[in-house]
Image (cartoon, grey):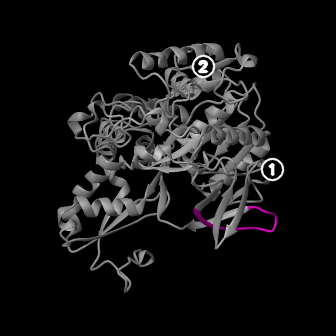
Amino acid sequence: MYFFERNEQFKNNIACICDDGRKYTYEELWDMGDELISSDSQAGKAGRHLVLLQVSNDIESLAAYLAHLRGGNPVILMSKDADRSLVDGMKETYGLAAGNANGNEAPGAEELNPKLALLLSTSGSTGDQKLVRLSYDNLQSNCDSIVEYLGLTAGERPITTLPMEYTYGLSVLHSHLAVGATIILTNKTLFNSEFWDMAEKYGATSMAGVPYTYAMYDRLRLTQMDLPHLKTMTQAGGHLKPELQEKFALWAKETGRKFFVMYGQTEATARMSYVPPERCLDKPGSIGIPVPGGRMEIVDDEIIYYGPNVSLGYATCAEDLAKGDDNQGRLATGDMGYMDEEGYFYITGRKKRFIKLQGKRISLDQIQDVLTEVLPDAKAGKLDIAVTGEDDKEIAVWIAGADEAAFAPEIQKIFEEKWAIRGRMVAVKKIDRIPRNSSGKIIYKELK
Amino acid sequence: MTNLEKYNYAFTSNFKVSEDELPGLKYQEIFEWDSVGHMDLIADIEAAYGIQMDTKDVLDLSSYEKGKDVLAKYGVNFDE
């Protein structure tokens, strides 16, 4: 049975506790969803159809999302806070724009792969319209793996700390719905005291986080808080600083809690590997072992994952939504790494130039291409640009052919508008010339 | 810099706002003052006055005005 279906066994369990303190049973959640999406069929969209759903961690978002999954409508998930232009761009690309301004028509039922369940962006808010195509079986199989290795039961009460449209945040919801657990569903941030009031009042049993979330937990001295129900902490979304990993692993060990360091990608639905909590202290820096049902190996120094959670492939236009299974259960992760003698995997770097910045996955190459395109001097070839960066450090924009002072404000403005990256995370640096090899490729390692 | 100038600077430098926009400014009211911005703001305030704030105070500093009350507890006098 799929986690989004009506499971009579859970119908009277509390599915969600919301910001206003209201509690909803599973049955209420299902009914609300069916009602919410019935307006779609009234609007003449009977039959299977593509949906763009803007969500946040609230009951209506979750109810509608699950109802679309039940109803067989493939869903593109975006944030309620997403920039209007990003949403409009997505709608146009996938044929959902009102009036079909550019002539793209909404794909008909026969133009949607029957297996297609969910379409997620890999890039957070960078405006990339490339989506990962996930099947119903992808969602369920990854959900089952997560339930198994985290040992989830109906007694769990996770509190939401990540956006719903983000694969990791979504996997927390899926895996707990699958076991009939109670989700403390909140849009409050870690710096709202209401968040901690809810965690305490409703007895949150687990919290998730990306590396930046852990920096916040640390700043708020989570390890000294009185949260007796909190039993499990999970971490994914990039490499956690070794000192923070050790701190939380030690705290967990001393207080009888479990701390899971995990690894995944949207291309594999969410999760590919995890470090069993009892090995967290003696396997620092490791991404762990494959999740149940998955397998990993190293091919030419790259981590390759095999499993039923490997996505069908990508989509960049409406026509791609009809496509079949491009990946056939095999994902080249793009992460370079190795395996130790006990079968634990480690990442040493990325094959392509992606970095994680405050939880967002960002392509340095894409930023470089966009800057070159939108800055007239760069487009005209008067200005040469290279972009470098590391996880959670400021992005460096190297410019040759002009003074940095002349371009810094403009470049920072582009970052804020296009990618919602604050200007202080961007350092514009002047260089005599961008180092290139004989074939014209930028030699990034010389930019330091 | 006076204590008030240091305080104002922590806001204007982090959130790209002018001093006249500070009265009434609240957490999450502007794009820059999100949870990431809050981390930066707290770090700068702590460095400016050489203090370490408690969790409760980090959470209570949810507006420009509330921050002044919070800091008074740490002996920061805004008349100096």
- Check the image and report above or below for A87 versus A183: below
Residue A98 at x, y percent in the picture: 29, 30
Residue A1 visible to the viewer: yes
Front residue of A278/A384: it is A384
**Left or right side of A230 for A101:** left
Residue at the spot 46% in from the left edge and 44% down from the top edge: B39
Q: Which chain carries label 2?
A: A
Q: In which quarter of the image is residue A105?
A: top left
Residue A349 at x, y percent in the picture: 57, 67
- Judged from the image, the secondary structure of the residue bearing numbered disc 1 is helix
The residue pinned by badge 1 equals A278
Q: For marks 2 and 1, give the CA distance.
A: 31 Å
Residue at the spot 50% in from the left edge and 42% down from the top edge: A120
Q: Magenta segment: does it hold A343?
A: yes
Q: Which mark is residue A17?
A: 2
- Judged from the image, the secondary structure of the residue bearing numbered disc 2 is strand
- Check the image and report above or below for A368 versus A185: below
- Check the image and report above or below for A315 versus A75: below
Q: Which chain carries label 1?
A: A
- Quadrant showing the C terminus of chain A: bottom left
- Check the image and report above or below for A253 versus A61: below
Q: Residue A239 carries which label?
A: none
Residue A420 at x, y percent in the picture: 35, 46
Front residue of B31/B4: it is B31
How packed mark 2 is, by other alpha carbons closer than 10 Å (few <14, some 14-19, many 20 or more), is many
- Quadrant showing the N terminus of chain A: top right
How packed mark 1 is, by other alpha carbons closer than 10 Å (few <14, some 14-19, many 20 or more), is some
Q: What stretch is highlighted in magenta?
A: A334-344
Q: What residue type is labelled 1?
A: Glu
Residue B45 visible to the viewer: no
Q: What residue type is labelled 2?
A: Ile
Q: Magenta segment: does it hold A279?
A: no
